[in-house]
Amino acid sequence: MTSFIPKWIFVVSILISLLGLFVGSSLYFSPGAFIREVDFSAEGVKFLSNMWAARQIAIAGTIGYCLVRKSRRMLKIALIAYWLMNLQDILIGISHSDIGLTIGASVFCLLSMVMISALTRSMKAR
């Protein structure tokens, strides 16, 4: 099923998906670029950074797939998952006093909420 996705949501979703692929790939190959205080040579820490990378790539791939399919409903579900991921990142940032993570996740959380709301309105209008 294909349906109309507002152009601005399509473009922003592409950017979010590309960012997720970039971050996930970077976490696989150079996780120290994100968190300098952590020793990523330890086996358990490397395992966790790989799980983090997998999460980033999975959500990016899911959003990208929704865009290829041009499905508003699928994209809405993917953006809800993305919103939930960012909401948790906000809480993690607050609990670790990481203002950068808190602000970044807040921006993407708000952006995804606006996109979800716009998709919901566009589905009701048709």
Image (spheres, helix red, strand yellow):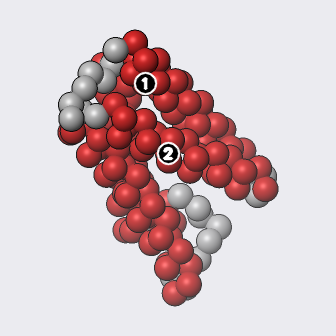
Locate the C terminus by quadrant.
Answer: top left
Q: Left or right: where does residue 8 sit relative to residue 69?
A: right
Specify whether residue 8 is in view: no
SS class, disc 1: helix
Residue 91, x across and y down, in percent? 72, 51
Q: Left or right: where does residue 108 sit relative to residue 65?
A: right
Residue that label 2 marks: 82
Residue that label 1 marks: 119
Up the image or down, 26 lies above or below 4; here it is: below
Q: Amino acid at mark 2?
A: Tyr
Specify whether residue 24 is in view: yes
* Front residue of this view, candidates 77 and 99: 77
Up the image or down, 4 lies above or below 31; here it is: above
Residue 7, x across and y down, in percent? 30, 19
SS class, disc 2: helix
**Label located before the other in sequence (1 or 2):** 2
Taking the view exactly as shown, the residue that stands out farthest to the top is 125
Residue 8, x across and y down, in percent? 36, 20
Q: Please tell me whether mark 1 or mark 2 is closer to you in this view.
A: 1
Up the image or down, 121 lies above or below 38; here it is: above
